[in-house]
Amino acid sequence: MQFSAKVSDICKQRSACAIIAVDSKNRLTASGDALDKAGNGKLSALLKRGDLGKATASTLLIPQLDGGAERVLLVRAGGSSLSQADFRKLANASAKAVTGFKNATSYLAELTVSDADTTWQAQQLALAAGLAGYKFTRCLSDAKPNALANFTVHAADKKQLKAVQVGIDQGSAQALGSNIARELGNLPGNICTPSYLASEAKALAKKHAKLTTTVLDNKKMESLGMGAFMSVAKGSDEPAAMIAMNYKGGKAGQKPIVLVGKGITFDTGGISIKPGMQMDEMKFDMCGAASVFGVMNALVEMNAPVNVVGVVAAAENMPSGRASKPGDIVTSMSGKTIEILNTDAEGRLVLCDALTWAGKFKPSVVIDIATLTGACVIALGNHATGLYANQDKLAEELLAAGENTGDRAWRMPLWDEYHAQLKSNFADLQNIGGREAGSVTAACFLSQFAQGYKWAHLDIAGSAWNSGGAKGATGRPVPLLLQYILNKK
Ligand code: BES
Ligand code: MN
Ligand code: ZN
């Protein structure tokens, strides 16, 4: 999808659909007024009839009035002051309504939003349009992708045009990254294997001079002592891969941000096998890794002036004669020994070695992203990502990036008291902490390996995909991560 900013006259601008806002008192913004005037009040007469719903973000598609657009989409804005959450609803509802058209021009940035500027509005509009345009078609025999190919955001004048362009650049990059993450997430486990992820990482390096990819094979991982990672990988016939995508877009000496993604391409639970219900959804257990791919793709696409390393710990968690058993004790790359009490708590086992390995990149900060615990879904549902951090400033910056993009996170504790739940009788620590505070104890486990650098952990078990009728990967937390990274540059 192409995105553009344009100062356009709604009465002349050709487009398949113009999107305009109508407030609760049927008042229009500047372009809507101009269209109404051109039609001698036809639009306001139509609004008086009450066809457009009263609820915020109701939409009504009408055929050509008197402007240059083939259709007009009316969107209900609220009362006099519009919140960011309301504007987001408008952006999403209008984007969904125009995916079937070849192009659309949005005049919604003419609205005034509390505590938000034009750049933010344009960013939200572009993000919503980009996300709405995505459809998983790869495994359909008769693929019909969405039509929307061009999305334009109208700016009032030259000065506003700049602000709109900045917002579009951010929002479209966030959408591009999210959609790449969604595509990888939606791919089934028989296609999206650890080797598939490794080849995607290599392909990205081939396309972009500033990005290099390293893939560690079994022998190398063995020699590095990645015993925790390998204890998960060894139950599967699919070879595992520890991947690093190193993007150098910033200054030479600048320490990189390191992202670490959980890439379990399918999680059966291993010998501690999961119940069958909805087990198919465990193909989404690599959505943390997918978000790392989404971010890295967006950064190279934008030629962003930052240094970022994307690490992906990719493996399949299977039961077999070679699989780890409950009670097995393994030695991690850090030297710490781990008693595996439940082979279904495999995410922390692959991540702990990835976190130790991440230290070798001399990071300014390390952020891991993982579909780590069902307990996080119980705690926060699918609205918020669980955020843990060993530094307050980092936590605040990530929370702010989430608020800004609408890809929200909520901070959880890493208090000493919780660490007691990980004490083992036979090893340095055990890989589960009991029923209580399951998301917290998983994060505490990771924190013991995230030593010597600033670190945050995002538990995306609830936010990474939708279940039920709308089953599919969401692309979260790509918008949050990109916003955080771009705020740093
Ligand atoms: N990938 C799962 C977490 C998960 C489960 C995410 C359901 C989303 C929905 C993870 O590997 C896992 O199985 N975690 C266990 C940990 C437990 C054994 C301590 C869980 O959450 O049940
Ligand atoms: Mn598991
Ligand atoms: Zn898992």
Image (cartoon, rainbow, N blue to C red):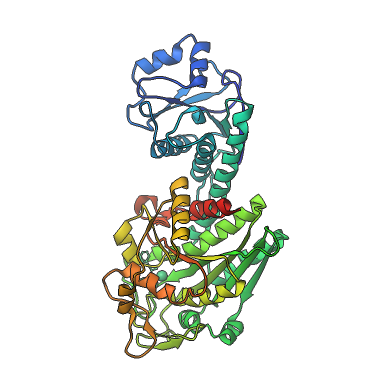
**Of residues 150 and 313, which is closer to you in this image?**
313
| Residue 140 in view in this figure | no
Q: In which quarter of the image is residue 437?
A: bottom left
Does residue 107 appear left or right of residue 79 in this picture? Answer: right
Q: Residue furthest bottom?
A: 426
Percent of width and height locating residue 211: 68, 62
Q: Residue at x 54, y 61 (%)?
A: 292
Q: Which residue lies furthest to the top in this view?
A: 40
| Residue 299 x %, y % | 62, 54
Residue 396, horizontal then vertical, whole percent: 44, 55
Task: Describe residue 208's horizontal placement relative to residue 388 as left or right.
Answer: right
In the image, what residue occupies the spot 47% across and 82% down?
228
Pick out the residue farthest to the right.
Answer: 209
Q: Nearest the camera: 181 or 282?
A: 181
Side (left or right) of 5 relative to 399? right
Does residue 35 appear in this view?
A: yes
Q: Quadrant of ligand 1?
A: bottom left
Q: Is residue 230 above or below residue 39?
A: below
Q: Is the N terminus in the top left, top right, bottom left or bottom right quadrant?
A: top right
Number of numbered labels in the structure image: 0
Question: Considering only vertical position in the picture, is 337 above or below 13?
Answer: below
Q: Residue 436: name its quadrant.
A: bottom left
Quarter of the image for residue 254 reads bottom right
Which of these two is toward me, 100 or 388?
388
108, above or below 184, in the image: above
Residue 225 spot, x, y in % from top left: 54, 86
Q: Which residue is drawn at 54% across and 23% down?
A: 70
